[in-house]
Image (cartoon, helix red, strand yellow):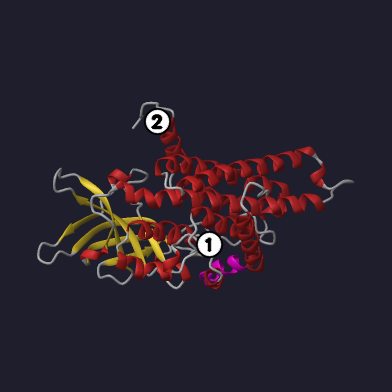
Amino acid sequence: MSATLEPQEHKDLRAAVAALGTRFGREYVTNVARQGGHPDELWAEAAKLGYLGVNLPEEYGGGGGGIAELSIVLEELGAAGCPLLMMVVSPAICGTVIARFGTAEQKRAWLPGLADGTRRMAFGITEPDAGSNSHRITTTARRDPAGGDWLLTGRKVFISGVDIADATLIVGRTEDARTGRLKPCLFIVPRDAEGFRRRQLDMELSSAEKQFELTLDDVRLPADALVGDEDAGLLQLFAGLNPERIMTAAFSIGMGRYALSRAVAYARERSVWETPIGAHQAIAHPLAQAHIDLELARLMMQKAAHLYDAGDDTGAGEAANMAKYAAAEACVRAVDQSVHTLGGNGLTREFGIASLITASRVSRIAPVSREMILNYVSHQTLGLPKSY
């Protein structure tokens, strides 16, 4: 894909990450997933080269960049067939929130490890009965008047990588002393905290990163487990959710590029009549359209990352939602057309594209559905009345 609008350092980063991704490739992550393991070798190598913490502050061992640089890393690994899903969660969401709002002690405790890959964090917001409505989150946090500790109670579902995370950044709600209303707050919950239990979900999706349901039964946390200001509420929450949408777009674009590259290579070589099948417009045009869609999605992703890194949270929110929507749609179409281009071969393990059919659908659903993004754009951007 063309990168002429990018500064030279971004081009260099793309090339370096692409080389790393090519060294591992899709066969590596596929084998790891089948064996029930995790891509630890790739994770460690990416960390050693400074890619995992490229968005984190230099004073804590990071690269001093932003979400723009981190999205490049994830996209290029995805384009090589070996994306790291935990990048969306650990450095992008959790690392960003702690870097922006954490106490000095929280930053010292977590950011160096997140940057060098020795520590990982999961992120828990989704609940069984809340869906996309964050205002219906029922996980609550109350203070123990005896000592000031927090007590968390609730459930979470579809939480990625809890088994390999040192802690989970949990979104709970506390009561506003002035209004009595519940407001969102973020808590660092260590994986071995008493009362914090997980159950792995049986997913059709083939991925090294497992999904879990979490139960918090009066999990006792010290007062300093709260990240940021108790009254900051949605500001801190969306400081993590906007990078999550941007990184999901990068994940989707990388996956779409990988599938498309496999289809283009096949269409150049596969001959049934006298010419390669890629010479026929019925094959060539849909692939060209998929390429265009991915390029357009990338431009919106770059805009969203630029706005976020520039500190424009409002503008980044709109662009991040649009980028996630565009990238997910482009990814699904690219994967579908790639499988169709290969015909029967597209459904074999040898070519390794069929499994992306399920994976690409995830980007339409998580972390927010395309319908909720359309709701957001219709009433936030276009000024239309809400239907909910």
Residue 164 visible in this rendered orientation of the protein: no
Type of amino acid under label 1: Leu
Spatial CA span between label 2 and label 1: 34 Å
Disc 1 crowd, CA 10 A, few/some/many (<14, 14-19, 20+)? many
Q: Which residue is mark 2?
A: 379
Q: Which mark is residue 238?
A: none
Task: Tell me where residue 112 appears, x and y as whole percent.
Answer: 42, 70
Q: Which residues, given as a range, are shown in magenta?
A: 28-40
Residue farthest to the left, as pictured: 146
Q: Earlier in the sequence, mark 2 or mark 1?
A: 1
Q: Residue at x 55, y 58 (%)?
A: 74
Type of amino acid under label 2: His
Q: Which residue is mark 1?
A: 84
* Magenta portion: prevailing SS class: helix
Task: Name the quadrant of the C terminus.
Answer: top left
Query: Would residue 171 be counted in the magenta stretch?
Result: no
Determine the secondary structure under disc 1. loop
Where is residue 225, by image quadrant?
Answer: bottom left
Q: How many numbered circles are shown?
A: 2
Along the viewing direction, whichever of 228 and 80 lies nearer the viewer: 228
Position of 32 with respect to 86 (left or right) is right
